[in-house]
């Protein structure tokens, strides 16, 4: 796929695109040429695997053309620019029909932290593979006995000469089945040390001793997985952040996951809204109105988040606002969709219906991942309202 | 009083201080608010100052004619500059149709009465019959009782349309800020109460159910604040329906904030003596002006549905990012 025959739009590598306006205009021109990768990713896919494959193809095209390299430092395979470039790119993709990010969500959840706190040499080698779609990443935080209480995690890393040996069990690891690398939070001190004794490791999921079992979900998809580590060897320098400094890494990631990530997700919610409007019924107008108010709120809050991250800061506890409003918007949107077209549950008829059913069901669980609604409200009460605990 | 952990803007704090020591119209003079109003279009800082006044007025439950003056601003210069001009604020009554409201203490100034479909009339306020309305929140409101059907038209409908849109946008922006301020005050009272009130041997703010009520209210306030600031920055280039969305959001969230705060206050919050009802009524009264949250949300939904296929760019995202 190439633009060479079309001439006018400036090529993606053009240094002028450091300016976000210039980048947005040129990228829009490219999108208007209906590139095959974009068109391919705008159809609902029958399986999680097929979804992942179409997205890999799209990322590969975006990388080859250069668009997908904007917003990332040159040292890590990028072309420079800021998170605003990425915001503009994904917004454009969503507007032109792409339905979601699949595993590439982790570019926005994990990516900024990897580059800020990860070992620079390793990241310089590995990150381009993430950008071009060949080697994706996963986030190994949760365990069977450590959900909301993440500091209770038990997966253990033991130093053995110049390597670490990791054993334990992670669960609900999204997209692990497709990933080459996982960030793994492991215990490097006693269990009693709680969050002070946790370290973030980079684990090669192809290593001996790693076993990945996918989990069939209630919405028919299966991107979630259980990942077990049985004496898995990890080179001693594959740490993100410092030894026993894993909690700060997790907090940095969660600032993206709860804050800026909302921008990327709302782009796709607006895309869903657009697709579904033709099925809207007058009876459901009340729900639609409510959903629009929350969508506009999440847009405004996440633009603030983007600006904060653009300047190298993180949101801290305020990311809970963005996360909670994003949940309300997503659930509100699909409340309206279901009210408008109840067929999707009982008789979805076609790929569109199946896709909508899966998205509706997924929206029922968004108040759990990334820190549950109750944990976010706890954060606001304690850290923002400063109510005594 | 403030719950915003970000430092409030200097202007917001000065406006609150001014409103604590004097009435609203005097505060506007002391703050140089009318000078800021003069550079509303071209100077984003002036615009933020003009609107911050309304947040302060909401927090302090002040009363002034600022809303009418702001809404008259798009018409400035059209009728000669010899006297202060304010605008009426529209409201739809289920029983009596469109009503024109004068906000603030009526003076002898000229007043613009907007009659959609006909045009705009400029009349002297003292020629009109006014009836006080409103509810326990300290905001002076009068409804024009006079029959408006035969008023001479000062600006024909063709010319009025674009200016009216601006006027309503500004009015809704300002009301959203004032609702935010009033709701913040209601919430601040409830947060303080959660620290002070003891039951079962501990402050009720220890109970997670109470904490979550207050936290949800704080999230609702953050949403109004973010969308109001974004819109203030983007004005006059607002995305389609943004003023309606913002006003509807402020009304819906503002009411929810007050309801959750009231729940935390318990029976005490239901008394005339406790100040909660004043901010709560301010929110309810403001929600009734320039479209209630439910009527606006309905309008937004119908407009979207009828334009199926071309969703208006709700967040006008790229442009929003580029702005400042
Ligand atoms: C779609 C999806 C994708 C996910 N992807 C990943 C991933 O990629 N990587 C990863 O590491 N994890 C992932 N997770 C896991 C997610 O982080 C956890 O589900 C989450 O932290 C909650 O843990 P839990 O499910 O064990 O629920 P629990 O912690 O057992 O909570 C159950 C319920 O109890 C409530 N609760 C718990 N403690 C309290 C309390 N103190 N006060 C009040 N209520 C409380 C919770 O709010 C919740 O409603 C994913 C989850 C989902 C649903």
Image (tube, coloured by chain):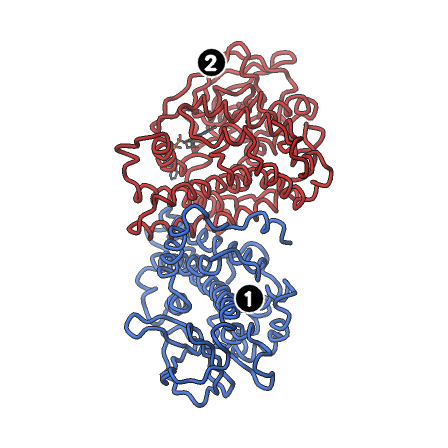
Residue A275 visible somewhere in the drawing: yes
Q: Nearer the viewer, residue A24 or A223?
A: A24
Question: As drawn, which residue projects farthest toward the top?
Answer: A208
Please report, as a chain letter, where disc 2 is located. Answer: A
Confirm if mark 2 falls within 8 A of ligand 1: no
Tag count: 2
Q: Crowding near pointer 1: few (<14 within 10 Å), some, many (20+)?
A: many
Question: As drawn, which residue projects farthest toward the bottom?
Answer: B127
Give the quarter of the figure containing the C terminus of chain B. bottom right
The quarter of the image that holds ligand 1 is top left
Q: Residue tagged by mark 1? A: B51
Per the rendering, the colour in which chain A appears is: red
From the viewer's perspective, is A373 left or right of B10?
left
Question: As drawn, which residue projects farthest toward the right?
Answer: A15
* Residue A31 higher or lower than B37, as above or below: above
- The kind of secondary structure element at disc 1 is helix
- Residue at image point 44% right, 53% down: B220
Per the rendering, the colour in which chain B appears is: blue
Place of residue A126 in the rendered image (x, y in percent of width and height, measured from the top left) = 64, 22
Q: Crowding near pointer 2: few (<14 within 10 Å), some, many (20+)?
A: some
Q: Nearer the viewer, residue A36 or A316?
A: A36
- Residue at image point 37% right, 85% down: B146
Q: Nearer the viewer, residue B153 or B135?
A: B153
Residue A189 visible somewhere in the drawing: no
Q: Residue tagged by mark 2? A: A211
Q: Nearer the viewer, residue A385 or A354?
A: A354
From the viewer's perspective, is B318 left or right of A219?
right
In terms of image quadrants, where is residue A62?
A: top right
Place of residue B116 in the rendered image (x, y in percent of width and height, measured from the top left) = 42, 72
| Of marks 1 and 2, the one in the foreground | 1
- The kind of secondary structure element at disc 2 is strand
* Residue B20 higher or lower than A52, as above or below: below
């Amino acid at each position: 796929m190439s633009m060479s025959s079309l001439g006018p739009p400036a090529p993606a590598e053009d240094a002028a695109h450091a300016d976000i306006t210039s980048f947005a205009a040129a990228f829009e021109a490219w999108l208007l040429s209906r590139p095959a990768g974009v068109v391919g990713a705008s159809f609902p896919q029958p399986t999680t695997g097929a979804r992942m494959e179409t997205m890999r193809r799209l990322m590969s095209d975006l990388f080859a053309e250069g668009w997908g390299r904007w917003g990332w430092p040159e040292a890590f395979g990028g072309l420079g620019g800021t998170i605003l470039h990425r915001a503009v790119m994904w917004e454009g993709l969503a507007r032109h029909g792409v339905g979601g990010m699949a595993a590439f969500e982790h570019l926005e959840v994990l990516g900024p932290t990897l580059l800020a706190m990860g070992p620079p040499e390793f990241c310089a080698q590995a990150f381009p593979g993430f950008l071009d779609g060949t080697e994706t990443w996963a986030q190994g935080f949760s365990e069977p006995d450590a959900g909301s209480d993440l500091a209770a995690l038990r997966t253990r890393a033991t130093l053995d000469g110049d390597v670490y040996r990791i054993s334990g069990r992670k669960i609900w690891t999204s997209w692990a089945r497709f990933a080459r690398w996982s960030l793994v939070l492991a215990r490097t001190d006693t269990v009693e040390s709680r969050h002070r004794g946790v370290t973030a490791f980079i684990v090669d999921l192809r290593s001996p001793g790693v076993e990945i079992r996918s989990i069939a979900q209630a919405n028919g998809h299966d991107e979630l997985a259980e990942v077990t580590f049985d004496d898995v060897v990890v080179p001693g320098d594959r740490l993100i952040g410092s030894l026993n400094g894993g909690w700060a890494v997790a907090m940095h990631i969660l600032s993206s996951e709860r804050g800026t990530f909302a921008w990327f997700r709302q782009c796709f919610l607006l895309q869903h809204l657009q697709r579904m409007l033709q099925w809207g019924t007058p009876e459901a107008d009340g729900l639609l109105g409510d959903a629009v108010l929350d969508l506009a709120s999440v847009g405004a809050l996440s633009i603030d988040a983007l600006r904060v991250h653009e300047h190298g800061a993180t949101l801290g506890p305020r990311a809970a606002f963005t996360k909670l409003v994003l949940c309300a918007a997503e659930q509100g949107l699909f409340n309206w969709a279901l009210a408008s077209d109840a067929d999707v549950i009982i008789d979805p008829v076609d790929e569109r219906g199946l896709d909508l059913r899966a998205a509706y069901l997924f929206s029922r669980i968004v108040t759990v991942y990334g820190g549950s609604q109750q944990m976010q409200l706890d954060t606001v009460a304690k850290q923002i309202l400063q109510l005594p605990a | 009083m403030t719950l915003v952990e970000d430092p409030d803007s200097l202007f917001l704090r000065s406006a609150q201080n001014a409103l604590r020591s004097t009435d609203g119209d005097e505060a506007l003079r002391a703050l140089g608010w009318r000078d800021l109003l003069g550079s509303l279009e071209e100077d984003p800082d002036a615009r933020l100052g003009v609107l911050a006044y309304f947040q302060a007025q909401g927090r302090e439950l002040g009363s002034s004619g600022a809303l009418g003056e702001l809404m008259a601003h798009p018409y400035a210069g059209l009728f000669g500059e010899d006297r202060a001009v304010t605008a009426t604020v529209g409201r739809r009554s289920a029983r009596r149709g469109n009503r024109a409201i004068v906000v603030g203490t009526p003076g002898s100034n000229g007043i613009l009465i907007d009659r959609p479909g006909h045009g705009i009339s400029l009349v002297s306020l003292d020629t009109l019959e006014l009836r006080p309305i409103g509810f326990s929140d300290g905001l002076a409101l009068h409804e024009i009782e006079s029959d408006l059907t035969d008023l001479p038209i000062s600006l024909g409908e063709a010319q009025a349309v674009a200016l009216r849109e601006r006027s309503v946008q500004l009015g809704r922006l300002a009301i959203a800020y004032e609702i935010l301020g009033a709701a913040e005050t209601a919430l601040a009272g409830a947060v303080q109460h959660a620290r002070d009130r003891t039951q079962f041997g501990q402050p009720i703010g220890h109970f997670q159910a109470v904490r979550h009520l207050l936290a949800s209210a704080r999230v609702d306030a953050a949403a109004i604040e973010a969308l109001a600031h974004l819109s203030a920055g983007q004005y006059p280039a607002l995305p389609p329906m943004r003023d309606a969305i913002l006003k509807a959001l402020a009304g819906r969230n503002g009411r929810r904030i007050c309801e959750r705060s009231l729940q935390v206050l318990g029976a005490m919050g239901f008394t005339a003596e406790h100040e909660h009802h004043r901010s709560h009524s301010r929110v309810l009264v403001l929600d009734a002006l320039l479209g209630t949250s439910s009527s606006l949300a309905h309008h937004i939904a119908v407009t979207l549905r009828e334009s199926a296929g071309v969703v208006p760019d709700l967040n006008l995202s790229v442009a929003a990012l580029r702005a400042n």
